[in-house]
Image (cartoon, grey):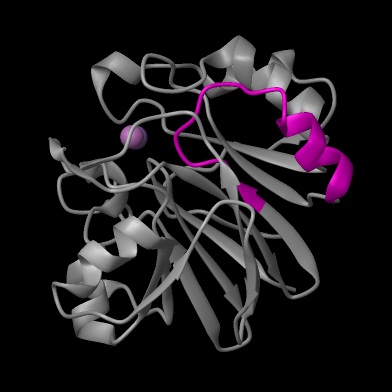
Amino acid sequence: MPLAKYLGHSCVELFEGNQKLIVDPFLTGNEQAAAKHTEVDTGYILVSHGHGDHIGDAIAIAKRTGATIIGTFELTNLCAKKGVDIHPMHIGGAHDFDFGRVKLTIAHHGGGYGDDASIYTGPPVGFLIEIGGKTVYHAGDTGLFYDMKLIGEMNEIDLAFLPIGDNFTMGLDDAVKAVEFLQPKRVVPIHFNTFPVIKASPQAFAEKVKYAQVVILEPGNSIEI
Ligand code: NI
Ligand code: MN
């Protein structure tokens, strides 16, 4: 059984046997993070976009562990200049890695490096990840979009990680609609309560969702996928 471990904000680790990957490793600067970047041991780092609360410690982790950074062509090539291994991809494209398959999906959001909007890091993305025979959807930072219905039609999603914090991404009610479109078996709310401006109630989200089981993970908690 593959495992998912939530480290806080949008950061998720996935494990299957001795295969490991991490998504959006924003640990330094996140008071709620369940790990320090120096504790992360991983083979792959998936980065949804260049904002500091997503690329986070990706470069430091890649340098120390030799992990490959997966993301858009633009973002990964910026990372390569810092001396790390990359696998560039783009929206709609999928690739088989040794842990499984990754497909980049659209996300409606911004693309700058950290808080420097003058460095374009390509469009933001979400990830469809196949690992251990299961399918995980990590939406990244995005507003609600109707193509989530298409993603749901074409993929049997076992576990979806969806932002609910509002202001920068979908808020509660739009995330509820996203669940209706995606039809995942289970959904984990992310990207809330890290900062005051994205305060949200995961319990209120859970009460409103009718089409899936909501699993509220505290940073540091794991579930079987
Ligand atoms: Ni962002
Ligand atoms: Mn964000």
Q: Magenta span has 106?
A: no
Image coordinates of residue 158 in percent, x first then y, are 78, 52
Figure check: 29 above or below 208: below
- Asked if residue 218 lies left or right of residue 96, the reply is left
- Direction from residue 80 to residue 98 in the image, left or right: right
Q: Quadrant of the N terminus?
A: bottom right
Along the horizontal axis of the image, is 182 left or right of 9? right
* Picture residue at 41% right of the left edge, 27% below the top: 192
Residue 32 shows up from this direction: no
Asked whether 175 or 18 is in front, the reply is: 175
Q: Is residue 202 left or right of residue 220?
A: right
- Which of the four quarters of the rendered structure image does ligand 2 lie in? top left
In this view of the protein, which residue sits in the foreground, 41 or 50?
Answer: 50
Magenta stretch: includes residue 152: yes
Q: Quadrant of residue 45?
A: bottom left
Q: Nearer the viewer, residue 127 or 32?
A: 127
Range of the magenta residues? 137-155
The answer to whether any part of residue 84 appears in the image is: yes
- Measuring from the top left, give residue 75's x and y in whole percent: 31, 57
The answer to which image quadrant residue 71 occupies is: bottom left
Q: Residue at x 72, y 32 (%)?
A: 148
How far from the left and from the top, in percent, is residue 25?
33, 57
